[in-house]
Image (tube, rainbow, N blue to C red):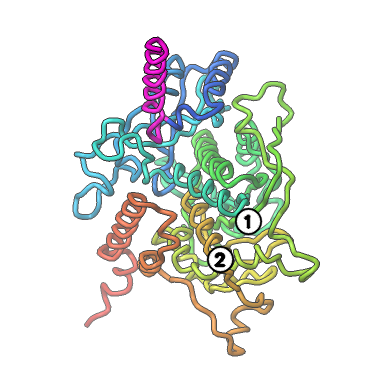
Amino acid sequence: MATKNKVSKKTTAKRSAKRAQTSTDLERHVNAQGRAAMVKQVRQKINQLGVTYIYFQFVSVTGRIVGKGIPADHWERTAERGFQLVYGSTANLFIDRHGDYIGYGPEASELVGIPDPETFVQLPWDKRVARVFCTCFRNREEKVNPGGHLTSDCRGNLRIIHDEFQKEHGMHLRLGTEPEMMWLKLDENRQLKGGVTKPNCYHIDQFEELRPAFMQVVEYSQAMGLDMIQGDHEDAPGQLELNWMFDDVMRNSDRLTTYRQICAQVARERNLHACFMSKPFMNVSASGCHHNMSLWTGGKAKVNKLHQKTLPGMEGAFSYLEGGKNHFLPDPKINKVKPGPVGLMSIGGVIEHLGALTSIGSSTVNSYRRLWDTGFWAPVFADWGFQNRTCALRVSAPGRFEYRSVDSMVNPYLMGAALLRAFDDGINRKLDPGEPEERNIYAAMDEGKKVKRLPMNLGDALKELAKDKVIKSAMPDEMYKVYHHYKNDEWEKFNHSVTDWDLEQYLDCLP
């Protein structure tokens, strides 16, 4: 009997120790089912591909890619223990106009970045180097919530919010983005000289002029897991849009982030500037980043091997969800044209929260130049329709919605999380978006239709966000504090600056 009690105590002690090891968000993430096997698979890839250095990267509040570089010899240790970096890196370690660090002061602890092995991919422009996305956690030694999820980690938040949505509704979000950007020329002093091409939309000759750059982008993109499907020249100087296959919201966000890195690298190699600023030129179109959305159940991840015998990274970076049931398709028993009930309620949620969503989709002072430069298809009204580009939301094809009030500076992780919260609210409250508007919205207004206008500057958009509890919940705790601090400071800096416009307008206006 005593022996049995002794064994029982040892077993209890072991179980307690194991529970202690997995009692924090950080340790649960490290010890997640299947992760140890993937860590070993990454080591095999490192050896197979000859990788000697790895970028461990995450994404800041503005969508900027930050992190550390670590020799590949230390992969296993870093995979288990992570690396440390100041909390303020999630806010680009910027200071506000008063000289204070945004979000976190110098007294704050250091976060722990844990790599997600399924995202490991070799860089095609230097095959000695690979990259892996990371999830961020509070320091293990914090007095409050040690090892907890770092709520200013926008990528980690998206995973949590998407998981919650799937548990409640049994559906997941698939997303395809349309990233426009501009290729600009540089002079001998690396100063901007305007676009490489003329602003001729869909013009194959102008597309051809950028062929050396975009073909290199396509090759690098395919090598890093982006299934490129189409591209064209848009209607601004040097403006291109290249698209890849839609996928799970997290993987698509990672791919948009990767695409931006690729464009920047190609620009370096060709002495160009890859410009993701929304509106560098007036009187031509700005660079948008329309989000095409759909909610699904089921489906399976299929690896797109892109005609390569050996994948230069983990299968997770090369797989796409296929099949399943699309809940945004019309229900023929109800209406053969309109989206089904889930789709309509989701549209209702987005329309309900468009004001706050605008602060995320149009996240810079410059974003609103796009809305004010009328006549270039930028949406400024809170309405929806079929193939109606004057509305903020349109049914671009059966089974998907195109959210148009979003530009090239968007942080896709914040946008994805906010859209999920809007869908959740629309479904739970059974919000009715009303009838689709098939007229040009300006003609409809001339005929007496009352339509709410979107916020027309960053300050007003931030006010809409501040009073919208649903969209704020997509930025839990420190995330909203950091975002508000960063973006409100950006708005204040703009308002207290004297610009060229001020001088041209007022310098000689009197006497």
Q: Which mark is residue 292?
A: 1
Query: Residue 254 falls in which quadrant of the image?
Result: top right
Residue 42 placement, left or right of 21: right
Image quadrant where one finds the N terminus: top left
Q: CA distance from mark 1 to mark 2?
A: 17 Å
Q: Position of residue 58 (x, y in %)?
A: 43, 37
Residue at 63% in and 51% down: 171
Which quarter of the figure is the C terminus placed in? bottom left
Which residues, given as a range, are shown in magenta? 1-27
- Residue in the image at 60% along x and 40% along y: 213
Q: Name the spot of residue 236 as percent of width and height, x first.
A: 57, 58
Find residue 9 and report its image quarter: top left
Which residue was labeled with disc 2?
A: 426
Magenta stretch contains residue 348: no
Q: Is residue 184 above or below residue 24?
A: below
- Disc tally is 2
Position in image of residue 39 (x %, y %):
52, 21
Rendered location of residue 10, percent (x, y)? 38, 15
Overall secondary structure of the magenta stretch? helix
Label 2, secondary structure: give it: helix
Q: Name the residue type under label 1.
A: Asn
| Position of 162 relative to 36 (above/below) | below
Q: Secondary structure at mark 1?
A: strand
Q: Amino acid at mark 2?
A: Gly
| Near-viewer residue (406 or 284) | 406
